[in-house]
Amino acid sequence: MAGQKQIKVHNKSSKPDNIVMKEHEIVCQCEEIESELPRFLRGFFAYLRGNVLPMTRLAYLHDIKFFCDYLIKETALSEAENTKDIKLSDFDSIRAVDVNAFIDYCRRYEVVTDDSIIVYENNNKTLARKKSSVSVMFKQLYRDELIKKNITDGFDPIRVPKATEREIKALQDDEVMIMLDAVTTGSHLTKKERQFWEKTKKRDKAILLLFLTYGLRLSELQQLNVSSFNFSRGEFTIYRKRGKESNMPLNQSVTGAVRDYIEEERADDSKLDEVHKDALFLSLQGRRMTERQIRELVKKYTSIGLSTSRKSGYSPHKLRATAATSLIGRGNSIFDVQALLDHEQVTTTQLYAAHKMNVKRELVKDMEWELERTEGKKKK
């Protein structure tokens, strides 16, 4: 955009510039949404800044903007034409039943564009977050004495399955081996995919091994730099949630894969723009890979390991689950795995210990009805 000022980082912290810039981008997104919301929510904005992580703050603000849009477009609770003009008296007139109607609306709704109708359907986990966002806002307005009643006690409960009730999705060891064979040899790739693979196979392998070995979060891997790695000391640095810096030990597999990529495939710094020179994982255009590009890469290779369609491949978070279940399955301490994966509570790590990947397989192994029929076997 003409006249747009270039953003420069004056960084005196221990964080690399790209981490500082990423945090700045999130803050800017938050401030942009805040500028579109009513000014009487300033106390709520301040509460979010001081009490939740930046990405959580952004998610809450998106939810509140959606709630305000809903008030204008779907109800008679406000006569404002845009969210910024909603009055405090409009909010003071909202009751729990109105918020419950909003949550019910969020279960399934349509957005009409010029050429299509998009149907959005949310699960209970998403609905619970939206309810939480609205609850926190109304509680803050009540604490600030801007509304007369705390209406949150009347919000309908949303049943979210307990963590122990969820099916943990992770690759099994043999599926991991198939996936790594594919990224190493190009097997099971389409003709078009092989054309890209020839140029990125070392990069792709390094990405998969980092996910599988350390259970990194997508954002942690995407922000890795060349300078994050100290091969002489056998370690690399990542930046966790809550601004924590963590040094991770390198093993031989990861060291070999990352060095091969840097030395033999990664573009030379002289060909890169200044902002991307330290980025570890680059796209074919010479820019730091986006989270979306990494997600699609992982989906492609995991679909090969799973012998399913590309659309049904796993997300990077499923590779985090794979790392957890594999580490625990090899007899490692739950507390050690908790530290490696940066789980805030050990109860989160225990979920993976309770997840026995082969239980169902063992249960059905001796129930081969058709094999027994065709081979003439008899049950004992």
Image: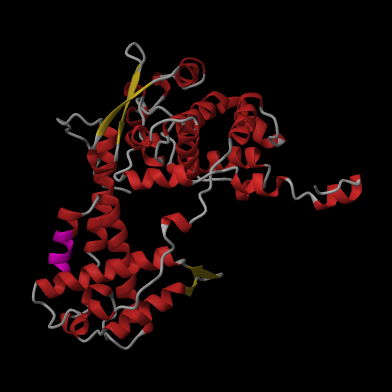
Q: Residue at x 57, y 40 (%)?
A: 171
| Left or right: residue 296 compared with residue 104 | right
Where 117 falls versus 166 (above or below)? below
> Which corner quadrant of the image does residue 43 belong to?
bottom left
| Left or right: residue 167 compared with residue 215 | right
Q: Is residue 44 magenta?
A: yes
> Which corner quadrant of the image does residue 352 belong to?
top left
How far across and how far down the image is residue 271, in percent? 42, 22
Q: Residue at x 57, y 26 (%)?
A: 201
Q: Is residue 134 magenta?
A: no
How far across and how far down the image is residue 129, in percent? 34, 64
How far across and how far down the image is residue 365, in percent? 71, 45
Nearest to the observer: residue 43 or residue 302: 302
Which residue reaches farthest front?
A: 380
Which residues fall within the magenta stretch?
A: 41-47
Where 38 falls versus 209 (above or below)? below
Where 68 falls versus 303 (above or below)? below
| Left or right: residue 307 compared with residue 291 | right
Nearest to the observer: residue 229 or residue 339: 339
Question: Mainly helix, strand or loop, the magenta region?
Answer: helix
Q: Residue at x 23, y 72 (%)?
A: 84
